[in-house]
Amino acid sequence: MKIKSKRLRKILADIFKRHNLSSSHSFICADALINAELVGAPTHGLSRLKMYCDRINKKVINPKPKIKIKKISQSIAHIDANNSIGFIAGDIGIKQAIKNAKKTGIGLVGIKNSGHYGLSGYYAEKAVKKNLIAFCFTNAPPAIAPHGARKSLFGTNPICFGTPTSSNVPFILDTSVSVINRGKIRVAAKTGKKIPEGVALDKFGKPTIDAKKALKGVQLPIAGFRGSGLAWMVDILSGVLTGGNHAGKVKDPFNDFSGPQNIGHLFIVFKANLFQKNYNQRIKDNIKTIKRLPKIKGIKEIMYPGQNKFKRFKKNSKKEINIPEIIKKDLEILNS
Ligand SMILES: NC(=O)c1ccc[n+]([C@@H]2O[C@H](COP(=O)([O-])OP(=O)(O)OC[C@H]3O[C@@H](n4cnc5c(N)ncnc54)[C@H](O)[C@@H]3O)[C@@H](O)[C@H]2O)c1
């Protein structure tokens, strides 16, 4: 089935409303899921809709959160998201960080008691569109073994940095610290496909290309102990610092309904021209220099992070969204 994004937006918002979200929160969630589809990250799009609804039904996501924003200074805020869907916490958090950055030059926002908020780049882009630089961090359920350990503890904890580029295509480096993201392994397990070598170990600590065994075992971090260190850093910034769960305590959203996830997020947003008034010219020159480098055989263009997603978004926005049969069934059941 193919469907126009405008029509899908209404269907999704109706589903969230049926699950007791307010109208404005329902549209925020619908927009985040559609964006994931349009940028070509379906593992963070409609495939997660049922999970969010299941968590609301099991009362481990609060559909009517009373979100508290504690102002620490003109620049700094601490948000208690009251177990909202992560999309709502993320939306309120990045808007607060942008507001503070516009006022004082820098906005620092820590969030606790949130849930899975989808793609970090989605929030970074909102700041970049206002000519701000953004760092976004979130922790996630155990998937990666710390270097030297045989047990998963860190999430795939993405690191995200965004900056304006002086063109309409933002620079958004948004990367998991696992070799591949967990969503891809889940999809492979569902469809019976193999996963690449070198991305996971089974529960006995042996390398595996079997997705189901990988899900029961551990994912490997990027670049060995360096990636493990980065995952740890994100756990500290998102969890230890904000009051969110950390050290392996974030619950798996798909199969652990024993309580809320209490995920933490951290947004650091600041004006791009804080130190150099001509930042826009400088970043333009920087990108131009790198793009002009001689290329390896087979490479047409040296791209900066975010360029590929931007291209996909533009292309996909003109087309209808493809809904796989399994998701079509979810939509029908959740909307009935
Ligand atoms: N909320 C969560 O718990 C959670 C956990 C993990 C990942 N995620 C999200 O999943 C998404 C996917 O993560 P991923 O690690 O699979 O990303 P990815 O591997 O697709 O891309 C990582 C980065 O590399 C850039 N890139 C890709 N190809 C490039 C090229 N040829 N040249 C230059 N740059 C290139 C991308 O623009 C991106 O910034 C991210 O948006 C992340 O925030 C969310």
Image: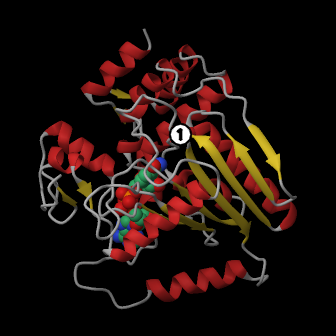
Q: Nearer the viewer, residue 279 or 122?
A: 122
* Numbered marks: total: 1
Q: Quadrant of residue 271?
A: bottom right
Mark 1 beta carbon near ligand 1 (under 8 Å): no
Which residue, as the protein is rendered here, is positioned at the far top?
Answer: 336
Residue 125 can be seen, yes or no: no
Q: Quadrant of residue 125?
A: bottom right
Residue 58 is situated, as x and y percent measured from the top left of the image, at 46, 20
> Image point 58% across, 66% down: which residue?
162
The image's colour scheme reads: secondary structure
Ligand 1 shows up in the quarter that is bottom left
* Label 1: element kind: loop
Residue 273 is situated, as x and y percent measured from the top left of the image, at 76, 77
Q: Nearer the viewer, residue 9 or 202?
A: 202
Q: Is residue 275 above or below residue 7?
A: below
Q: Is residue 71 left or right of residue 93?
A: right
Residue 77 can be seen, yes or no: yes
Residue 227 is situated, as x and y percent measured from the top left of the image, at 38, 71
> Image point 48% across, 45% down: which residue?
118
Residue 293 is situated, as x and y percent measured from the top left of the image, at 40, 90
Q: Amino acid at mark 1?
A: Gly
> Image point 56% across, 54% down: which residue?
239
- Residue carrying label 1: 115
Q: Is residue 37 above or below residue 277?
A: above
Q: Nearer the viewer, residue 307 or 331?
A: 331
Q: Is residue 242 left or right of residue 252?
A: right
> Image point 66% across, 22% down: which residue?
23
Please rate how many residues cluster around mark 1, counting C-alpha atoms within 10 Å: few if below 14, some from 14 to 19, many from 20: many
Q: Is residue 292 above or below residue 323?
A: below
Is the N terminus in the top left, top right, bottom left or bottom right quadrant? top left
